[in-house]
Image (tube, rainbow, N blue to C red):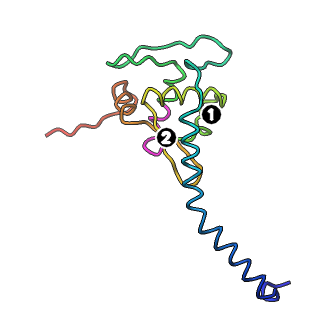
Amino acid sequence: MPLSDLPMDKLFLFFLVLFVVLSLYPAWTRTAGRIRRFLQEHEEHPAGPVVPGGREAATFETWQQGVRLSDLELFILWRLAMAGRRGLSRRQLQDELHLAPAVVRANLASLQRRGLVRVIALRGLTFRHGLSERGRQFAVAEGYLPQLRREG
C-alpha cells in the first residue's frame, strides 16, 4: 500500500509525531549527557588502582610533583597520549590494551581524580577520554609526547 493511499488524518498524525520526536532529540541528548556526567561524578570508586587477579599494583614515583601511578595507569595514560587531542573511548582502550572493562573503568576514574584525564563529550551519549592540561604536561615530562622547538 503506497503512502499516498493513506487517509489525510493518519498522514498528519505521522508527520506531527515525527516533527515532535525530531525537535526533542537535541534536548534529550543534552539532558542525557548531563545525567551521565552526574552519575560518573557520583559513582563510588575503589580506593586504589585495580589489577587483574587481585594482586597489589606496582606503583612508580614519577614527575616533579611526585605523582604515583600504577603500571596500568601508565599504560592507559601512554595510550591516551598517543591518541592525540581526540582521545579514545573506554571500549577502544579495552580492546587495544586487552584489559577487562572494570579495570579500565577503575583506572580511568583514578586518573580523572588526579586531574590527568578528562572526559570529552561528543554527540549523543558518546564519550571519549583524553589528556587534561596537567596530563599533557605529565606526558611531556615523561617523554610520551615529543616537543618540537623552533630555534632562531
Q: Residues within 10 Å of mark 1 (few under 14, many from 20)?
A: some
What range of the chain is rendered magenta? Answer: 79-87
What residue do we see at 50% from left, 33% from top? 79
Answer above or below: position of 105 versus 85: above
What amino acid type is highlighted by mark number 1? Gln
Residue in the foreground of this view, choosing between 139 and 152: 139
Residue 83: say if magenta.
yes
**Based on the displayed image, in which of its 4 quarters is residue 116 positioned?**
top left
Q: Quadrant of the C terminus?
A: top left
Q: Earlier in the sequence, mark 1 or mark 2?
A: 1
Answer above or below: position of 134 versus 89: above
Q: Position of residue 124 (x, y in %)?
A: 58, 54
Q: Position of residue 4 (x, y in %)?
A: 78, 88
Is residue 111 left or right of 7 when viewed as pictured?
left
Q: Nearer the viewer, mark 1 or mark 2?
A: 2
Q: Position of residue 66 (x, y in %)?
A: 37, 16
SS label for mark 2: strand
Residue in the foreground of this view, choosing between 61 and 98: 61
Is residue 40 left or right of 17 when viewed as pictured?
left
Q: Quadrant of the N terminus?
A: bottom right
Q: Which mark is residue 94?
A: 1
What residue do we see at 33% from left, 25% from top? 141
Residue in the foreground of this view, choosing between 130 and 44: 44
Residue 26: say if magenta.
no
Q: Position of residue 104 (x, y in %)?
A: 60, 29
SS label for mark 1: helix
Which residue is most to the right? 1
Q: Which residue is mark 2?
A: 119
**Based on the displayed image, in which of its 4 quarters is residue 11 positioned?**
bottom right
